[in-house]
Image (cartoon, rainbow, N blue to C red):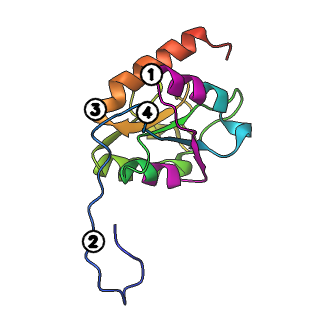
């Protein structure tokens, strides 16, 4: 991470995803817009992980940057029926999280499939970005929430 102003004489700082997970202090982020993501479902997943913080609701690929910088432990997005994710909304963010030591998958645990043209039309329920340490626990929480949801 470095400033965009080249006049500033600042050394770049490496960013890393959080390697620890403490549910009482952990943070998760999700989209601001309710229209294309189920905020109720992300709340259920956070509850299954015993996370007590309120979600950070931010726009655009800032969510990926938040996970990469360890400002958030998790980014979750579960599109509502009829909404198809577009690759340009995720491609750069995925690279940033992965370069920071994290992992981004669909809600079934598979890497995102960029081969479908403009859309991520093979997504299994949603998108997850987190640390490699937390990924398996997050997949379990998604599974538990999914089996008890009415989505």
Q: How far apart are the alpha carbons under marks 2 and 3?
A: 25 Å
Q: How many marks?
A: 4
User: Going from the N terminus, do you reach mark 3 or mark 1 first?
Assistant: 1
Viewer-nearest of labels 2 and 4? 4
Q: Secondary structure at mark 2?
A: loop
Tell me if 66 is positioned left or right of 82 in this view. left
User: Going from the N terminus, do you reach mark 1 or mark 4 first?
Assistant: 4
Q: Residues within 10 Å of mark 1 (few under 14, many from 20)?
A: some
Assess whether mark 1 and mark 2 are in contact (beta carbons under 8 angstroms): no
Residue sitting at the far front: 24
Q: How far apart are the alpha carbons under marks 3 and 1?
A: 17 Å
Quarter the C terminus occupies: top right
Q: Position of residue 137 (x, y in %)?
A: 36, 22
Q: Position of residue 39 (x, y in %)?
A: 65, 33
Residue hosting label 4: 24
Q: Position of residue 149 (x, y in %)?
A: 63, 13
User: Going from the N terminus, do you reach mark 2 or mark 3 first?
Assistant: 2
Residue hosting label 1: 108
Q: How far apart are the alpha carbons under marks 2 and 4?
A: 31 Å
Viewer-nearest of labels 3 and 1? 3
In this picture, which residue range is highlighted in magenta? 42-65
- Which disc is residue 133 wearing? 3
User: Going from the N terminus, do you reach mark 2 or mark 4 first?
Assistant: 2
Could you say which is closer to the camera, residue 145 or residue 90?
145
Q: Residues within 10 Å of mark 4 (few under 14, many from 20)?
A: few
Q: Is residue 58 magenta?
A: yes
Residue hosting label 2: 12
Q: How far apart are the alpha carbons under marks 4 and 3?
A: 17 Å
């Amino acid at each position: 991470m470095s400033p965009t102003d080249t006049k500033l004489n600042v050394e770049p700082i490496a960013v890393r995803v959080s390697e620890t997970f403490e549910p009482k202090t952990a943070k998760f982020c999700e989209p601001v817009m309710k229209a294309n993501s189920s905020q109720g479902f992300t709340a259920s997943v956070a509850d299954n992980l015993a996370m007590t913080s309120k979600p950070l609701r931010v726009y655009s690929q800032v969510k990926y940057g938040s996970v990469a910088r360890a400002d958030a432990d998790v980014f979750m997005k579960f599109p509502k029926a009829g909404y198809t994710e577009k690759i340009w909304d995720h491609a750069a963010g995925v690279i940033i999280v992965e370069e920071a030591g994290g992992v981004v998958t669909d809600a079934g645990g598979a890497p995102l499939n960029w081969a479908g043209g403009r859309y991520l039309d093979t997504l299994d329920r949603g998108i997850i970005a987190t640390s490699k340490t937390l990924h398996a626990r997050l997949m379990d929480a998604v599974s538990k929430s999914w089996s008890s949801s009415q989505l």
